[in-house]
Structures are given as C-alpha cells and as structure tokens.
Image (spheres, grey):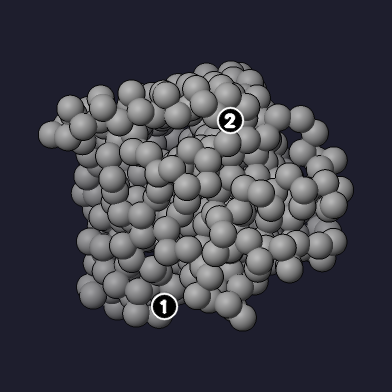
Amino acid sequence: MSRKTNPQVVIVGAGPAGMLLAYQLVTNGVPVRVLERHPDFEREFRGELLQPSALAPLEQLGILPLLVEKKLALPNVERRLFVGRTRRVMVPGGKERGSLVSQAGLLQLLHELCGRHPHYQLDFGTTALQTIRENGRVVALKTRREGAEGRVEGDLFVDCSGRNSGLRRDVGLQVQTTQVPADVVWLRFDLSDAPEALPESVDVHMFGKGVVVVFVPTTRSRLQVAYSAPGDLGGLRKDVPELRRRLLPTVPEKLRPHIEAKLDERTESQFLRVVVDRVERWHAPGILFLGDAAHTMSPSGGLGLNLAIRDSLVAANHLLDAIRAEQPLDERVFQKIEDERRPETDMIQGMQTRVHRMVMAPMFVEHIMFTLLGLVLRLMKKADQSSRGVTPVEMRYGVPVSRLP
C-alpha cells in the first residue's frame, strides 16, 4: 500500500475484537468501516467472562465503569473448578476474579462512541463473501446485503469475523487443526423467576471420561450451561429425554430443580463443534486476521474472547505507529503484530489441548491429578504473570471516553 495519512480501514466482524479495534482507530482519526453480517447486536453470546488482562484496557478507557453503571457488567466474578459436583480444586494460573460483561451491551456502547466521529461507518446485515485482489493484494471485498451483491473498497482489511471466517480460505492461507475429543451442547435458561438460584461465579465441573459441565450466569438473569462429552452431541441435543438423563445428575443441588423444570423441547440450545486451529500466518497482502479468525480457541477456560481483545490492542498499537510515521500498512507491520501475539496464543492452544486430554481420564484419576497439582500450585504462590502465561499488553493509543466529543 502506498503511503497515506488517513487510510480507509475495513473491519469484518463487529465482535469485541473488531469493535475495540475500530474504537482505537476511529478515536485516533483513522476512517473505519465495519461490516457485520447480523442485523444488530441483540443476540446472546457464548461466555462473557472477561479476565483482568482484558478488563484493564476497558477500565483505562472508562468503558467498564459505564457498563457497570448500566448494569451491563457484573464485577468481581470468580471462575471455579470442581472435580465432580462438590470437590473444589485449585485453578491452574491462580485465583483471578474477572467481570461478566454483556457482549451486546459492550458492542452497542462502542458503536455509539465510535458514532460520534464522522469517519466511522457500521454496515449491519452485510456479509463479506470473498476478497477482490489486484496484483496479489486485497483491494476490496465482495459483499451481500439484503440479497444484493456489492463491493467495499479499502486500504486495509482486518478480519475479526471469528471461527467461521471464509476469507482466510479465500486468500489461500493454510490452517493447522488439532483434533479434540469432545464437542459441546450449549443450553440457555431464563432464571428471571428465580434469580437467587443463579451462581455468583463461573463454575466448571469435571466428571471424568471427557464429561465436563460449565455453568455461566449472565447479566440478564439467564444461565448458560455447556455440556461437553465424547460421542454424538449433535444427536444428543435433539434427544431431550436422554439429555435430561445425562445432564441433571451433574447439576449442583441449588440449581437442579430449576433446570429440571425448564429443560424440555423448547429450551434454547446450540451444538458447538470444538476446534483448535491456527492459520500458518495471520496475514496476506492487504488483509490481517485477528482473534478466532487467526487462531480458533477451544471453549476451555473461556480464553478466546480475552485473547481476541488483546489481539486488537496490539494490532492498534502497530497500525497507528505506522500511520503516524506515514509508513505503508504492509506485511512488515502485520508480521510485527503476529510476532507479538503468536507466542501467547500458541502457548494457550497447547495448554487447551493438554486440558482436553486430562479430562478424558476417569474421575478418580482426576482427583489424584488435582491433588498433586494443588500441592505444586501452593509452592508457586509467588509466581508472577509471565510464569502464568499472561504477557502484559500495553494500550498505547487509548482515548478515554471522557475526552471524546
């Protein structure tokens, strides 16, 4: 790309990574157009626990306090780990408290803040179909909106569209996939009639031989339940009597009568194919991939959202460095972003595949493993962030909400 003071950046996907990147660029004077295939933000997202590494920039920007004020964030939420229904064990990486943040609320707020600037545009209901290249470089996207095909041009394209991105295949990037042994049935329950039954933490229960159940409260008095086990979970999702037989014995006593009363054919559910993959490189000429579009994470540990946010912070740092220096946004800049982020994502993906193997053990073996792990962790209480696999990420161009027009 030739040097340009204010390049047009096109972001595919208005999720947390895409919208936080848009906010950082727009508030620093860079024109941004976001393409989002959904018609709005009003949908329920899987998993909304943000860990301290992702919360810090939102706090610094003044966004987190606004979400708390609007009751769109629940602070001081802990992630707890159990073997069976009742034996609590230590979490690898140490005890951390995060916040449950409504993704829909976060995205709507970022959209409204970006909308204060005339050089920002968000196109809902717009799907990016494929890239258009000239001399091997992506210069535009072929899109579809309300049944009509269109063309969106830009100087730089950033794909934050998640695990189902077709653009990475379109530009010929090779994908390395790691097989994991179990998929997930994701269930959603409305507990607004019994809010006292909602857990105050995100609880993970391991029952051996690959059976893992996660209970996640949301900011809307709803409960998400993720049931993971070997076998045909797509078929299990449709067989409600068998799903009840297998799920209910794993539910904590306080929750069980509510789940038992509400689990039927009308229950909101989703089948999630668990994939751990990564592209050979995070970019091609003219296009950069971030978040799950670059490195699809397992739901294990709820780390995908947090990593995607950290990707956007690093990407904004390097893109704005280049723009301010009037340097081209080319593969050299993209590679700096990948080089800074890849070590952490590779490490966590490796950890996730090991965890998936661990939970395949019988439950009595899990008891033994976590007893030994607990002893090790107690000896490592003084471990710093780097030993826990968390690499500090600096937000160099964050503009606080208080300074917006």
Dot 1 alpha-carbon crowd within 10 angstroms: few under 14, some 14 to 19, many 20 or more: some
User: Which label number is shown at residue 208?
Assistant: 2
Q: Is residue 232 left or right of residue 80?
A: right
Residue 259: which quarter of the image? bottom right
User: Which label number is shown at residue 10?
Assistant: none
Dot 2 alpha-carbon crowd within 10 angstroms: few under 14, some 14 to 19, many 20 or more: many
Q: Residue at x 41, y 77 (%)?
A: 71
Q: Residue at x 58, y 30 (%)?
A: 208
Q: Position of residue 343 (x, y in %)?
A: 35, 24
Q: For the residues carrying marks 2 and 1, which lies nearer the camera in this image?
A: 2
Residue 138: which quarter of the image? top right
For label 2, the SS is: loop
Tell me, yes or no, if residue 360 can be seen here: yes
- Image height of 188 relative to 294, above or below: below
Quarter of the image with the N terminus is top left
Q: Position of residue 252 (x, y in %)?
A: 55, 55
Q: Position of residue 374 (x, y in %)?
A: 30, 31
Tell me, yes or no, if residue 165 can be seen here: no
- Image height of 305 relative to 364, above or below: below
Q: Amino acid at mark 2?
A: Gly
Q: How many marks?
A: 2
Q: Residue at x 34, y 34 (%)?
A: 92
**363, 1: nearer the viewer:** 363
Badge 1 is on which residue? 71
For label 1, the SS is: loop
